[in-house]
Each structure stands twice: as structure tokens, then as C-alpha cells.
Image (cartoon, rainbow, N blue to C red):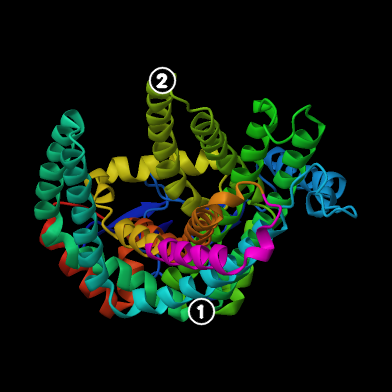
Amino acid sequence: METVIIQHSLSGDATEKTMEGPTVVQGTAVASPYDHRPKQESSPQNEIRDPTGPGVGAKQETRCRDPIFAFLLYGNVAAIVAVVLTYGPDAFYTSVDDNQETQDGYDYSGYIYSVLVLGLFAIILSGLSLPLMMCIPELLIKMSLFFMLGLSAAMMIMSWMSQNIIGGIIGTIFFLIFICYARAVWSRIPFASVNLLTACTAIKKNFCVVFVAYFFIALALGWSLLWAVALAGVSNKVIVESDNPYEGSQVNWGYLFLLFLSYFFTHQVIQNTTHCVVAGTVGTWWFSPGDSGCGAVMGSLVRSLTTSFGSICFGSLLVAIIQATRALANAARDNENQILVCIAQCILSCLESLLEYFNKWAFVYVGLYGYSYIEAGKNVITLFKNRGWEAIIADDLISNVFFFLSLCVGLICAAIGFALGSGQDQWFVNAPYNSDIQYSVSVLGFIVGLVLTSILMSTIASAVNTVIVCFAEGPAEFEANHPELSAKMRETWLSFYPDCGC
């Protein structure tokens, strides 16, 4: 018989529960369901959770999960590489005869050079935002809240100034709702800042994970370049083979959807892999701080790229399908179908948001314990449903900070893109849409800056999500391993949610 101490609340009350034997995970007796500490370091004082409780995760058997989706990702990348090798060179070839008359076809090299330059600027700027979040978390939360309020007010004013009565009324309603929201959550900013501080502390103690994030940013940049070449090659092939190349041909929506799906699928995999690596690293810091460091980061990285990679690809593909459909609907918009497209985009946007919200917590469990995608989602839902923390999760103030910083980097990159379009005319001599090249490159800069920065922002976002899940599962381990942070967390948490149990 074995006695296990179960922590019931943040106040430290505990009762004893008698179990028939040691906890068994996949046939092996372990000291804790979260098996990050060496077995010889376990003691009755460390066994402070009920491993049989609902929503409590357990380390899974080491094997590949959801492997079919990993193979789909490999096939996707191989297909884009094949397209680049087949059609890519033609997109850069501009032949000029003796009369300096350009033959049919466009030169996309200027756009490719712009993506490279803008991507480098985005990496530098996003890197500067990381220490900023670590130094002034509470100030950034307040600034981002005011920014969102100002953005809502600007949309309302623009609607009234353009004499859009319906838009003005809707904008006014949403502005008033946001004022009420800001007033309601203002007192929760200290709690959100403590979560952000705890997450940043975990990142500081495992700073190698930042370099992993940079690696994935570089990988995302390389993928964006590769995909841009594939898109240019396919577009050039379609235009050149049409009867009237400068008027363009009918859009092949099938090709366009597959290209969008390919880009978003791989981008989601890159972003979610970072998420899982950070989750596993923060989990080690939380439950076994002695094992923190580069070793914990590399172990989490290896698990994310091997046994958990199929689960990452599974969830990423679901979001990518919706994103690609939204992009296709936006590309199909014209004066005759704007209302229908708007309705479709609204529905798709809601579905995308719900699925991304689900993934945000599911991938924490994938990174922490190695669950399959479906099992991870079930565990997260069970955990928070039984604990009654749905309202706490909804108070996602910290996401405003990530959006605010990503938007700032995107706007700066857009300004840099405008300068490139104005000062590097030789790059765009035979490029499509060269009459508005400054605006085209500005839009390209905004997209590149926003996308690449979102990957680095996901480092802190993943740590925050992991902190919430770990605090739900192991507040006593947090108290034992990180007493100062635990005291701050408990103080702010209980001041707003005195009845919540842990």
C-alpha cells in the first residue's frame, strides 16, 4: 500500500489517499505522472498530485503518433521542391532580343529579393521585441489594450466619416462593448502580467529555446522563399501558355487552392512545432528545474520532430485547410459576389479561430506528455471543464500583446518595403504590376513581417499557455520549485478567483 498526498487548493490543504501500489505509466512505475525528474530523486513529498484524477496527464509510451499526417507534410514539401525545379527557373528568365523588346513572360526576381531583405529585417525586429516583453510585461499589456480600444474607435469613426450608417452603428456598438470589456478586465492585468512574467522566467532559464525559435524563423523564411518561387513558376507557366499573356488567363482555382494549402500547412507545422518544443521545455522547468537548460530543450525538440511530429501535422493540416479556403474566397471576390464571399469568410474565420484555440491547448499536452492529437485535446478539455476554469482561459489579455507587437513589426516592414519599391527600380523592370510596385512590395513586407514575427511571438505565447496548464495540474510542485513566483501567482489568482480549486 502507498500513501499519496493530494493537494486540494492553493491554501495548502491536503488529504491522504491510499493507493494499491505505485503509479504505473506504460508498464513502468514512476514517481510522478509527469516523468521529467530522475526516479531516484522522487520522494513522498514530491508526490503531491492524484495521478488518477480527471484531466491529469501522464507521460506516454515512446512511439510515433499520427504518422500518416507526417508523411503528408513530407509529400507536400517534396511537391513544392519538384515544382520549383521544374518551373522555377523560367520565372527568373527574361530574354531580350536585339531591339530590346522583352519576350512573353514576367520577371519575378524583384519580389524574391524583396522577400529575402524584408525577412531579414523581420527577424531582427522580432528579436528586439523578445527582451522588451521580458522587461515590461504589465506596461505592454496596458499598451496593447489601449491600442485595441483605439483601433475599435478608429474603425467606428471611419465608418461614420464615410457615411456608412450601418457600419457606423455596428462600429459604435462594438466600441462600447470593448470599453466595457476593457473596464472589466483592467483589474486582471496584474494576474496576466504574472503569467507573462512566469513564462518569461522559464524562457530565461532555458534560453536555448530562443535559438530554436530563431531556427524555425529561418526555416519559415526559407519556406516562404521556396513557396514564392513555386508560385512564380506556376503563375509564369499559366500566363506564358495563354493566348493573351498580358491580359492573363482564367485562374485555375484548383492550383491556387493547393498552393495556398501547401504554404499554410507547412507554416502551421513550423509554428506548432515551436509551440510543442516550448511546452516540453517549460514543463521540465516547472516540475524538475534541475534538469532545465539546453539538454531539456534538445530533448523536447527531438520528441517534437520524431514521435510527436505526426500529431503536430494533424492539427496543423486542419487549420491550413480553413486558411487556404479563406484565401481562395478572398481571391475570388469581385463586385458581383462580395456579400456571399463576406459571409463565407466570416464563417471560415470563426471556424479557424475555434480550431486554433483548440490547438493552442492541445499542443501543450502533445509537448508535455507525448499524447496523440485527439487524446491531447480530450485531456485539455477534461482538465479545464472539471476545474471550472473556462472563464480564466477566456481572459486572454496576453494575446493582445503578441498581436500588437506582430502588427508593429509588420507595419515597419511595410514601410521598408515601400522604400525598396521606390529605391530599387531595377529589380522590377519586367515584374507584373510594376505600375504600383511600391504598394505591392509594402503589402508583401507587411505579410512577411507579420508571419515571421508570429513565430517568435509563439515562443512566449506557448510558455504562457504551458504555465496555465501546469498550474492547473501541479500548483504544489510550482510552490516547491519556484516559491517566489508561486506566491505572486497565488496572490493574484486567488484575488480574482477565490473559489477555484487546483
Using the image as rendered, state which of residue 475 and residue 171 is in the foreground: 171
The count of marks equals 2
Q: Position of residue 8 (x, y in %)?
A: 24, 56
Q: Pick the residue in front: 19 or 290.
A: 290
| Magenta stretch: includes residue 421 | yes
Nearest to the eye among marks 2 and 1: give it. Answer: 2
Residue 416 horizontal side relative to residue 263, left or right: left
Q: Secondary structure at mark 1?
A: loop
In the rendering, at what x and y percent does residue 428 appear? 66, 58
What residue is shown at x 28% (from left), y 77% (from top)? 136
Amino acid type at mark 1: Phe
**Looking at the image, is 354 positioned above or below residue 16?**
above
Q: Specify whether 262 is left or right of 371.
A: right
Name the foreground residue: 74 vs 199. Answer: 74
Q: Which residue is mark 2?
A: 340
Please name the residue that numbered disc 1 is placed on: 207
Above or below, 367 against 87 in this view is below
At x 51%, y 79%, the residue is 207
Which range of residues does the magenta coloring cover? 408-431
Residue at x 42%, y 32% (from the top left corner): 351
Residue 283 % position (x, y): 46, 65
Q: Is residue 94 left or right of residue 352?
A: right
